[in-house]
Image (cartoon, grey):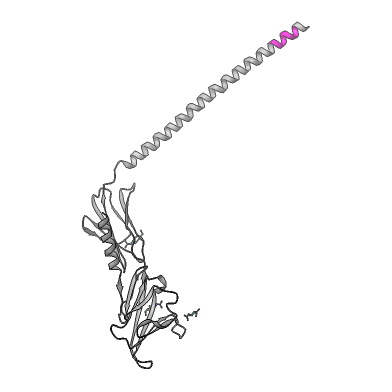
Amino acid sequence: MMLIFGLMLLQTAACLDQFCWFDQSDPCYAALGHKLNLPMMLGATNYILKIIKRINETKDDPFCRFQHGIMEETECDLYNNRPEVTIIRGMLIINRVIRADSGNYTLNIYSSQIRQTFEGDLQVIVEAPIGSVEVSVICSSSGVMRVFCSSEGDQLLYSWTLNGDPLKDGNSSIDLDEETDGDISCSVKNHVSHAQKTIRLKPCPVCSVSLVFVVVRSLELMVLFGLLGAFHIYMRHTSGKKKEGQKVRMRRFREGHEHTAEDS
Ligand SMILES: *[C@@H]1O[C@H](CO)[C@@H](O)[C@H](O)[C@H]1NC(C)=O
Ligand SMILES: *[C@@H]1O[C@H](CO)[C@@H](O)[C@H](O)[C@H]1NC(C)=O
Ligand SMILES: *[C@@H]1O[C@H](CO)[C@@H](O)[C@H](O)[C@H]1NC(C)=O
C-alpha cells in the first residue's frame, strides 16, 4: 500500500514537471506549487536574454535581463525576492509556481546589445492541480439516485462512466435510476492534472423512505402517549392533594367550632 502510494506520488510529481517554450502558440498551463521549466536558449552562452512581463505594455513593465544566460549577471525586478526562480544553462526554472506567475511574457534574445535575434511571446496560466476526488451518493424520495463528485483544483471538467460505459452528463453530479447497480467512476481533469475515483453503487433501499416515516411516526406517538400519561398522573396527583386539603380544612373548621363551643 505504502509502495503504491509512493509510486503514485512519483508519477504525479513527474507529470507536473512541465516545460513551456517562448514561441509556443498555445497558452502554457502551469501547475500551482509545482515546477515550471522555460528553456530560453539551449547551448549558446554569448547572448543577452531579456524576459518582460507585459502588464501595461510600457517601459515600467517588470523584466529580467540575463547576461550569458546566468542569474548572477542580472538586472532583474521581475523575480525580486524569489530565490526559487533560477537560471540553469539558459533555462528559467520556477520551482514552485505561484498564482502571480500567470500573465503574458515576451522573451528577447540579443547576440549583442544592439542586434535582436529572437523574440517570442508566452501566455502563462496558473491552475491549481486536482486534489483527491470524492464520490458520494444520495437516494432521494422521488426515486432518483444522485451521485456527487467533488475535488479541489481550478477549471475542473467532470466525466462519468458506469461499469466502464461513458455517461454523457459532464457535470459534478448526475442522476441515475434508484435501482442502478455497479461501479460508478468520476474523472476530473483540468489543464495540469487529472484524477479519478470509482465507487460501487448499491441500489437505493426502496423501503428506506417509508421505514423512516414509520419510525418517526412511532416516536411521535410514543411522545404523545408519554405526555398523556404524565398529564393523567399529574391530574390525579393534584386532585388527590386538593381533596386532602379540603379534608384537612374541614377537620380544622370542625375542631375550631368544637373549641369555641368548649370555651363558651
Ligand atoms: C499599470 O497601470 C496601473 C494603472 O494604470 C498602475 O497602477 C500600475 O502600477 C501599472 N503597472 C506597471 C507594472 O506599470
Ligand atoms: C494575455 O494575452 C492574451 C492573448 O493575447 C489575452 O487574451 C489575455 O487577456 C492577456 N492576459 C493578460 C493577463 O494580460
Ligand atoms: C450541470 O448542473 C447544473 C445544475 O445542477 C445545470 O444547470 C447544468 O445545466 C448542468 N450542465 C450540464 C452540462 O448538464
State whether residue 260 appears in this view: yes
| Magenta segment, prevailing SS (helix, strand or loop) | helix
The one of 171 and 71 positioned closer to us in this rendering? 71
> How many numbered marks appear?
0
In the image, residue 209 lies in the stretch drawn in magenta: no
Point out the quarter of the image occupied by ligand 3. bottom left
- Residue found at the very far front of the displayed protein: 72
User: Does residue 259 lie above or below 21 as drawn?
Assistant: above
Quadrant placement of the N terminus? bottom left
Q: Where residue 32 appears, x then y in whole percent? A: 37, 68
- Residue found at the very far left of the displayed protein: 164
- Residue found at the very far right of the displayed protein: 264
Snapshot quadrant of residue 9: bottom left
At 28% across and 67% down in the image, what residue appears? 14
Quadrant placement of the C terminus? top right
In the image, residue 260 lies in the stretch drawn in magenta: yes
User: Does residue 171 lie above or below 204 as drawn?
Assistant: below
User: Does residue 55 lie above or below 208 as drawn?
Assistant: below
Snapshot quadrant of residue 52: bottom left
At 21% across and 58% down in the image, what residue appears? 165
User: Does residue 170 lie above or below 212 as drawn?
Assistant: below
Q: Where residue 34 appears, x then y in whole percent? A: 34, 68
Snapshot quadrant of residue 72: bottom left
The one of 252 and 150 positioned closer to us in this rendering? 150
Q: Where residue 168 appears, x then y in whole percent? A: 26, 61
Q: What span is colored magenta in the figure? A: 255-261
The one of 71 and 92 positioned closer to us in this rendering? 71
State whether residue 159 appears in this view: no
Q: Where residue 212 appears, x then y in whole percent? A: 36, 40
Q: Is residue 12 left or right of residue 224?
A: left
The one of 80 and 240 positioned closer to us in this rendering? 80
At 36% across and 83% down in the image, what residue appears? 107
